[in-house]
């Protein structure tokens, strides 16, 4: 069932602590602003455990994160947008998986970094496309699906489309949660079918779940006390740093 030969959690204590802290911080971020878990965690985690494993862990923990938050966010979603984004993501994901399996890691690092930086630019622009044709959702969904299985950073296209349509904050969070949850499960099925998830990946993911839960819990408390715009600016700065670091790592390391 599992494609790799890892049968134990094959990381040092220092690596485990590092991954746990990254998960804590990025789960907190997503709990507050509604996105950012994989976008932040993958570029940072890949410095500790490598790109391929960082993508797998972000997929596993990110999906668990969305399952955990589903009860609080299951209402207020835009069901029509959810359907369009998901169908488009399902079409794009197999192509991303091909890139994940066969592309050179340095190329993927550069691609990841450029994707993150483009996402930052899109999120900063905040254009009003509330009257845009529904084809925008399909295009962004396709791109999101490709990013889902190639780098696990499928958020920016979705966030861009939802923000461009001026979605209300609660609708924004609820819609993203449902899309991330279902598309994340779909991506994990593809990874399992092609043998990309090892037992050690599962064990490491399960072992850091308490960090994820702690980050989400603290995020819920802080969410109503921190001005969303200020926190969002801080997140965008961190994303830009992570994106530049990913490009540099792919080109020069």
Image (spheres, grey):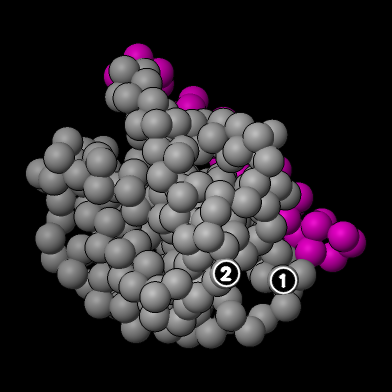
* Mark pair 2, 1: CA separation: 20 Å
Most distant residue in the top direction: 225
Indicate the quadrant containing the C terminus: top left, top right, bottom left or bottom right. bottom right
- Name the residue rendered at 57%, 69% in the picture: 5
Where is mark 1, residue-wise?
A: 105
**Going by the image, does 148 lie left or right of 233?**
left
Residue 157 visible somewhere in the drawing: yes
Where is mark 2, residue-wise?
A: 5
Viewer-side residue, 199 vs 106: 199
Viewer-side residue, 168 vs 51: 51
Percent position of residue 104, x then y? 72, 78
Indicate the quadrant containing the N terminus: top left, top right, bottom left or bottom right. bottom left
How packed mark 2 is, by other alpha carbons closer than 10 Å (few <14, some 14-19, many 20 or more), is: few
Would residue 234 be counted in the magenta stretch?
yes
**Going by the image, does 176 lie left or right of 77?**
right
Total residue callouts: 2
Would residue 223 be counted in the magenta stretch?
no
Percent position of residue 24, x then y? 48, 31
Viewer-side residue, 1 vs 235: 1
How packed mark 1 is, by other alpha carbons closer than 10 Å (few <14, some 14-19, many 20 or more), is: some
Most distant residue in the front direction: 7
- Name the residue rendered at 51%, 31% in the picture: 25
Percent position of residue 94, x then y? 42, 83
Which region of the structure is painted magenta? Answer: 224-253
Percent position of residue 17, x then y? 61, 32
- Name the residue rendered at 50%, 75% in the picture: 3
């Amino acid at each position: 069932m599992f494609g790799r030969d890892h049968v134990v959690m094959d990381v040092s204590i220092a690596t485990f602590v590092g991954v746990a802290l990254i998960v804590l911080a990025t789960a907190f971020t997503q709990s507050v602003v509604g996105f950012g878990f994989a976008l932040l965690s993958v570029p940072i985690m890949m410095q500790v455990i490598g790109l391929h494993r960082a993508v797998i862990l972000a997929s596993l923990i990110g999906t668990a994160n969305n399952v955990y938050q589903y009860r609080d966010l299951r209402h207020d979603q835009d069901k029509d947008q959810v359907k369009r984004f998901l169908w488009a993501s399902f079409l794009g994901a197999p192509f991303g998986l091909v890139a994940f399996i066969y592309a050179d890691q340095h190329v993927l690092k550069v691609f990841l970094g450029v994707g993150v930086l483009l996402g930052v630019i899109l999120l900063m622009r905040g254009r009003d496309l509330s009257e845009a044709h529904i084809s925008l959702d399909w295009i962004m969904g396709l791109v999101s699906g490709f990013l889902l299985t190639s780098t696990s950073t499928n958020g920016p296209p979705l966030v861009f489309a939802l923000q461009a349509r001026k979605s209300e904050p609660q609708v924004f969070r609820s819609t993203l949660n449902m899309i991330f949850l279902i598309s994340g499960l779909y991506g994990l099925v593809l990874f399992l079918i092609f043998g990309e998830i090892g037992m050690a990946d599962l064990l490491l993911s399960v072992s850091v779940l308490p960090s994820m839960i702690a980050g989400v819990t603290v995020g819920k408390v802080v969410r109503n006390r921190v001005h969303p715009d200020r926190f969002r600016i801080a997140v965008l700065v961190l994303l830009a740093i992570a994106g530049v670091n990913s490009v540099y790592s792919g080109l020069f390391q």
